[in-house]
Amino acid sequence: MDDRTHPRPVAATVREAMADLTASERKVARALLSDYPVAGLATAGELAARAGVSTPTVVRFVTHLGLPGYAAFQRALRREVHAQMGSPVEQYDEVLRRTSEEGVLMSSLATLRGALDASFHELPISEFDRAVDLLCTPGVRISVVGGRFSHVLAQYLVHHLQLLRDQVAVLPSDEFARIVLVGEVDKDDLLVVFDYRRYDQRTVRLAAEARRGGARVLLLTDPGLSPIAEHADVVLPTRVDAPSPFDSLLPAFGLVETLVAAVTLRLGEKGRHRVERLEGLREVLDPDAPSSLPPTDG
């Protein structure tokens, strides 16, 4: 991982390298991810004290990530902070300059195509396969939650999964529904969370408490990684590069479509039988309604 050329966030590299780290280096990784990226912006000695290891262990950890030293490690983190915390206002002038020079249509095509292509190439296949495993596990209750914009992703995923399997629902946004979920979760629950930069701290706390109660957590986020990554069993990041000052969810939509395709293949005839049964019931209960099979718009 060259800090000057590597496009991936440090947190993503850390998570992928976790299995290959020594026990002491994993302590450093967990300390970093528990307060990411702030913990990594402290001195090597302070990070070592936080993790309960020696300073040389921190240096070995950084080297294991493919960085030449702690200074390079911090440069990479600082670039991430700048990218993650940039508000739409701060991005406005740059976006207007770029689109006015290239033309909105073609610059948008290039940006969105690049973000989609990079997202799929950067996604670890093993993590994607684990996500499909979780979504297809029989008897698991699946609750899905999104944010101000990403709630559309949550609803879109749920509408499709409900055609293929049982016990899938969008978690209502009211506080009591969240309290009930956390109070009742156990190992048979899966919480699917969409959380993108400028992360929702209320959702972060929800995921942490659900994980503490025994639920498994599947996180879909941006490459900077929501703090929920610390509590997640599986993390699926996608780019948010956009032709406007506002983050794009196009790559995330593409990922959701791909998850639905993979779940459909995995469930096979079982999923097909459920779709046929639901279609039959719909024809009986509301014969004038359009088919629920895609394409659908109502």
Image (cartoon, rainbow, N blue to C red):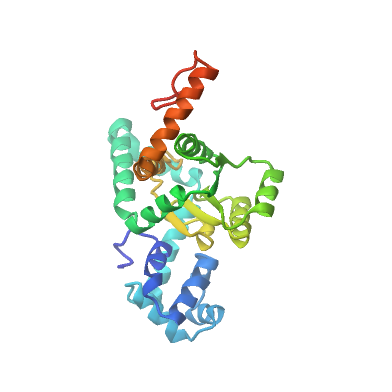
* Viewer-closest of 158 and 58: 158
- Corner quadrant of residue 267: top left
Residue at image coords 69%, 48%:
180
* Viewer-closest of 6 and 231: 231
Residue at image coords 50%, 43%:
89
- Residue 298 in view: no
Q: Position of residue 136 (x, y in %)?
A: 44, 48
Q: Position of residue 282 (x, y in %)?
A: 50, 22
* Viewer-closest of 136 and 1: 136
Which quarter of the rendered picture does the N terminus lie within?
bottom left
Left or right: 112, with 198 as reference point: left
Left or right: 48, with 253 as reference point: right
Q: Position of residue 211 (x, y in %)?
A: 58, 59
Q: Is residue 167 above or below residue 236?
A: above
- Residue 25 in view: yes
Residue at image coords 52%, 74%:
42
Q: Position of residue 65 (x, y in %)?
A: 35, 72
Residue at image coords 29%, 36%:
109
Q: Is residue 110 above or below residue 180?
A: above
Q: Is residue 104 above or below residue 131?
A: above
